[in-house]
Amino acid sequence: MCGTVGHPLHSTEKGSIPVHCPFCRHCDTKVSDSRAAEDGSAIRRRRLCPMCERKFTTIEQIILTVVKRSGVVEAFSRDKVMRGVSKACKGRPVTQAQLAALAQRVEESLRASGQAEIPSEKIGVAILGPLEELDSVAYLRFASVYKNYESVDDFQREIDALRLSATVKQPRPEGADAFDRITAQEPLLS
């Protein structure tokens, strides 16, 4: 077997997996250039086959896997994120494009963590932030399942937290800072 060192997946370079030439199937290709892809989620490698001297490009990307509570491991699916969030968005003014953008943000944040195996709980956490920005009612629906609400008090605490974050995030009207400074001064007449 071409380039084996005790195991069929090892090439002549210690610890690397052989990349076969797509033209002549030679198994010892050389990397001539490596660059990060535009969004940084993959590596683009330019390769040269020493046998047929043809060049080709490979794209290498970390495969995200999800570790479920049961211990089952499966590949991360952006579509599965969209399906789960779309249930919470049912009847809400949320478009498919917005769901796709949310799922992309979730995947990008998970990739940015640098972990290849992601516990399913972290996916739920990664969904909550973007979903809160997108639609507070859908957020509340999703959070009620994800956080396993058991009573109306759980909902009320979450609603209170949503209201508090909404008041913190609201932009102040133009001139409000000047008005605050004026009203904070001591009165000129007593």
Image (cartoon, rainbow, N blue to C red):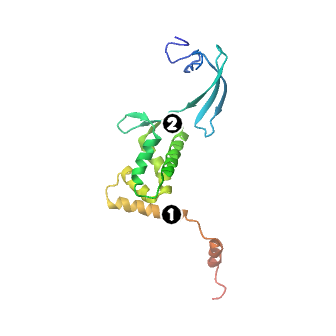
- Looking at the image, which residue is at 42% across and 42% down? 80
Foreground pick, 127 / 177: 127
Foreground pick, 140 / 149: 140
Image: 54 above or below 92: above
Task: Check disc 2 and report the residue beneath it.
Answer: 115
- Rate crowding at label 2 as few (under 14), some (14 to 19) or many (20 or more) other CA atoms within 10 Å: few
Please give the label number shown on residue 70. none
Visible residue check, residue 10: yes
Dot 2 falls on a residue whose secondary structure is loop
Dot 1 falls on a residue whose secondary structure is helix
Residue 5 place in picture, x, y as percent = 53, 13
Task: Give the amino acid at mark 1.
Answer: Ala
Residue 92 place in picture, x, y as percent = 43, 58
- Rate crowding at label 1 as few (under 14), some (14 to 19) or many (20 or more) other CA atoms within 10 Å: few
Please give the label number shown on residue 166. 1
- Looking at the image, which residue is at 67% across and 85% down? 188
Visible residue check, residue 142: no
